């Protein structure tokens, strides 16, 4: 790296506004279904995943911890907060997308019950809405506003956000310039760690699905 490049990198590091560590909740009882905003707790497998997640995050010293107010996110965040002697700040704006009539159903069940709606949703996502659901446009705007508020209130800090796959895909998609219709190509495993650094002049995605 040249001296000029090192200098630019140093200046940009100095302009770091907020580091946001986005974590998907551990496995819930509704895994494999369109859980959405159904309030499922963690499964036994999910609870066993928490110690490994704590190890993955042990190098961070968080200034604040935020979580969706749904049980599976709270149960994932709580032991992490206790370890760092912080409280979990519950944020309804970090909830997963509401899937309307499809909540609690598997894709196979949806295809059997509403084959035409399922076909149209796949073909025209994200403009095609699920019956009775939050539109993708509404969901995306909700998530963007919530994350903007968190970053704006935590300048110069490192924060943990425990939330859902859809929320993280919106955040990463915006940071990486991915078209909305392609955001679901981003793999996000249970307990996946993702890091987005917010600077005064833009964003850097440091880690995805770790």
Image: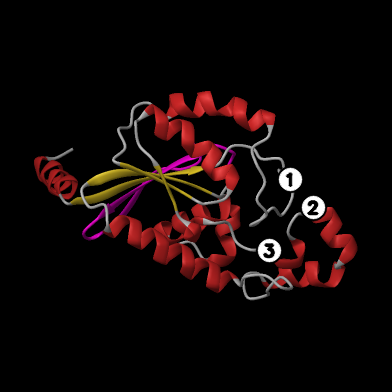
In the rendered view, would you say 197 is above or below 181?
A: above
Assess whether mark 2 and mark 3 are in contact (beta carbons under 8 angstroms).
no
Mark 1 and mark 2 lie on one chain; the one further toward the N terminus is: 1
As drawn, which residue projects farthest toward the right?
112
Where are the magenta residues, as a range? 189-210
Task: State the separation of the CA atoms marked 3 and 2.
Answer: 12 Å
Of the numbered discs 1 and 3, the one sitting upstream in the chain is 1
At 66% across and 40% down in the image, what residue appears?
28
For disc 3, the marked residue is: 99
| Label 1 packing within 10 angstroms: few (<14), some (14-19), many (20+) | few
To which residue does mark 2 refer? Answer: 106
* Mark 1–mark 2 distance (CA, rounded to whole Å): 6 Å
**Residue 109 at x, y percent in the picture:** 85, 56
Whole-percent x and y of residue 19? 30, 46
Q: Secondary structure at mark 2?
A: loop
Q: Residue at x 52, y 43 (%)?
A: 74
Location of residue 191 in the rendering, given as x and y in whole percent from the top left corner: 54, 37
Bin the neighbour count of mark 2 within 10 Å (Cα to Cα): few under 14, some 14-19, many 20 and up.
some
Contact flag, marks 1 and 2 (Cβ < 8 Å): yes
Q: How is the image coloured?
A: secondary structure
Query: Looking at the rendered structure, which numbered label has been put on residue 174?
Result: none
Quadrant of image for the N terminus: top left
Residue at 67% across / 70% down in the picture?
133
Asked if residue 21 lies left or right of residue 164, the reply is left
| Callout in the foreground (1, 3) | 3
């Amino acid at each position: 790296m040249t001296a000029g490049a090192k200098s630019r990198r140093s200046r940009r590091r100095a302009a770091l506004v907020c580091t946001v560590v986005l974590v998907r909740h551990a496995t819930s009882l509704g895994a494999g279904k369109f859980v959405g905003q159904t309030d499922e707790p963690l499964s036994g497998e999910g609870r066993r995943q928490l110690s490994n997640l704590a190890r993955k995050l042990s190098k961070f010293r968080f200034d604040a911890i935020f979580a969706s107010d749904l049980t599976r996110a709270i149960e994932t965040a709580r032991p992490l907060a206790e370890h760092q002697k912080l409280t979990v700040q519950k944020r309804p704006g970090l909830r997963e997308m509401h899937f309307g009539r499809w909540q609690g159903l598997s894709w196979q069940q949806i295809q059997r019950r509403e084959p035409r709606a399922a076909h149209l949703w796949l073909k025209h996502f994200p403009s095609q809405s699920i019956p009775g659901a939050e539109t993708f446009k509404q969901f995306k705007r909700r998530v963007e506003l919530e994350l903007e508020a968190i970053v704006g209130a935590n300048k110069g800090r490192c924060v943990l956000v425990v939330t859902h796959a859809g929320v993280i895909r919106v955040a990463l998609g915006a940071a990486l310039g991915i078209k909305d219709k392609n955001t679901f190509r981003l793999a996000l495993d249970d307990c996946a760690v993702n890091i987005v650094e917010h600077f005064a002049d833009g964003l850097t995605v440091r880690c995805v699905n770790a």
